[in-house]
Each structure stands twice: as structure tokens, then as C-alpha cells.
Amino acid sequence: MSDLAEAQKISRTSPLAGLFYLVGKKVLTLVEYVGGLTTLGVKTIASVGKNFVGLRDTAQQFEVIGIKSSSLTNLIAIFTGMVLAVQFIVGL
């Protein structure tokens, strides 16, 4: 049964009961979502504290992942530009 149908069923006994039901359901959904985000944040911070990686290792990973892969990134950018140019020309 949908929330609206449930609220209509409840509102037969009291006019405001259906409204309180819908608002309460939305509030509980919001509280559950915020609670999940909070749990995720706490677990993330705890994980960073337990599994701390040194600054030198982090900088080395940035270099390997970022700087040394720039040639591949530039090649992908060039081909993406060419595809967009061809699509633009066909659209004219």
C-alpha cells in the first residue's frame, strides 16, 4: 500500500492524523539518511586514523597516477575533441 493510501486510511479516524503520518514518515526518512551519512563519516575518519599512510608515499602515488599518466590523458582528450568536432559538423 502506498504512503498516500495509508495516510488516507489513517485520516478517516482523525483529520490531522494522515498529515502527521506523512510528515513523520518524511522526517524518519531524513533522520535515517543523515544517520547513515554520519556513520559513514565516523567510519571514514576512524579508518584514516588506523591506516595512516605517510606523506612521502602519498606524494609518490600522486606522481605515479597523475603525472606519469598525463600522456594517456592528453591522448584521450584529443580523440574526445575530434569526436565532438565530427558530431558538430554532422549537426550542421
Image (spheres, grey):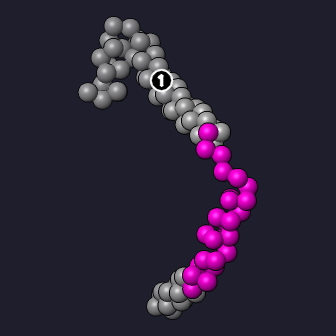
Q: Answer left or right for 6 relative to 63.
A: left
Horizontal side of 5 relative to 38 (left or right) equals: left
Q: Secondary structure at mark 1?
A: helix
Residue at the spot 57% in from the left edge and 82% down from the top edge: 72
Farthest left residue in view: 1
Q: Is residue 44 left or right of residue 59?
A: left
Q: Position of residue 7 (x, y in %)?
A: 35, 20
Q: Residue at x 36, y 14 (%)?
A: 11
Task: Identify whether 26 is placed above or below 78.
Answer: above
Query: Is residue 25 among the parts visible in the rendering?
Result: yes
Give the residue drawn at x 54%, y 28%. 35
Q: Is residue 61 above or below residue 32?
A: below
Relative height, residue 27 to residue 51 (above, below) = above
Counting from the top left corner in percent of width and height, residue 53 is at 66, 51
Tell me where residue 9 appears, x and y as whole percent: 29, 17
Residue with the mark numbered 1: 28
Residue 15: where, in percent of width, then height?
Answer: 41, 11
**Residue 57 colored in magenta in the image:** yes
Residues in magenta, as a range = 50-75
